[in-house]
Amino acid sequence: MDKSVYAADCIETPHDIAALEQVLARHVSSTGSSPKFTANFVMANPDFETIEGSGFQSYHYTPYFEEQSLFDGPALAAAWSGAIGRGSFGPQLHCREHVKWWTWMEDLRRKGTDATATFDLRMCGVPRVCSGTQTSYFQPIYVEDNYIRSNPQAMADTVLEGAGLFEAHFGRKSETTIAPVAFWNDGIEALWNEAAIKGIQSPWLQSLKTDDKLSHIPRYLGQTNRHGQTYLLRNCTFEPRKRSLGFDRCFADVSRAFRFRKPAVISTHRVNYVGSVEPSGAAQAREELDRLIQSILTRWPETEFLTSDELYRKVINDT
């Protein structure tokens, strides 16, 4: 597992959320704007016990806020509710579960797979780089393959049930989204439209996967699709657990964005800030985040901080 930075990844805790909030609270721009995160919510996890009880014949999931077996879901949901209420985070739908569950289920019914080797640990395999068979069940989910072609309703349920869980939990629809691993296709956009999602976060290249064939479509900020949905471009990277993608890289990205009079939309992941597995790494990441925010405000004191849905509304109002 030491081959992957994701060896340090785990479910966030209320302590992790509070520690990150403490960093954000230290800073405010000259216009009174405070730093905030858009939190991409995976709304459910596999229900290992019910899946095992079915003889690995049927897939089941548990909403994160109802989870009792893997972690204290209600306590975590309460911590998120408080942080969102204080304006430190804005929730955004990511997906129902970040697992290509139909491939995982198929491998659970076979012997000698990563799925069976890690099931009793309540894991869905390991990162691809750590797998002896180069298998990852966390890789692109919104894809087209033989299973989805034969079971199109399965993908519709995955997307729409995720959106429904988000609305039920947060009391509103998710106005924006980003696909797991930033892979999606026209069919997913249609389902997002059905779920009233209006803004789509994207890197500058949208990735599509049909069976083993990869393709890409260039995207730009403010571009719209046939459903009238607007693309919001991620153009900065901050992954401090990966040393080459830490402060220096992100500050250069932000500088370039502002130089071209574009919003700096920073991509960063949970693994950087969770400390249950490796507390020192999370503490170092928070220190680097603190330095990044302070450096941005020193160079651009009038910086305005926005969540994804706030950026979406600003983009459509300015075009």
Image: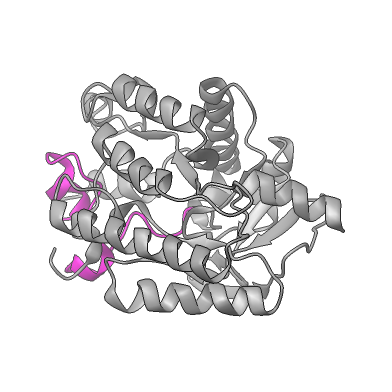
Q: Is residue 313 magenta?
A: no
Residue 135 lies, with reference to residue 110, above or below; the image says below
Picture residue at 77% right of the left edge, 62% below the top: 222
Q: How many marks?
A: 0
Q: Residue furthest front?
A: 30
**Relative to 60, 96 lies left or right:** right
- The answer to whether residue 112 shows anywhere in this view is no
Q: Quadrant of the C terminus?
A: bottom right
Q: Is residue 123 magenta?
A: yes
Q: For residue 174, what is the image quadrant?
A: top right
Image coordinates for residue 200, horizontal then vertical, percent: 66, 53
Picture residue at 54% right of the left edge, 66% below the top: 209
Residue 245 lies, with reference to residue 118, above or below; the image says below
Picture residue at 42% right of the left edge, 41% below the top: 97
Q: Quadrant of the N terminus?
A: bottom left
Highlighted range, magenta: 113-141
- The answer to whether residue 147 shows anywhere in this view is yes
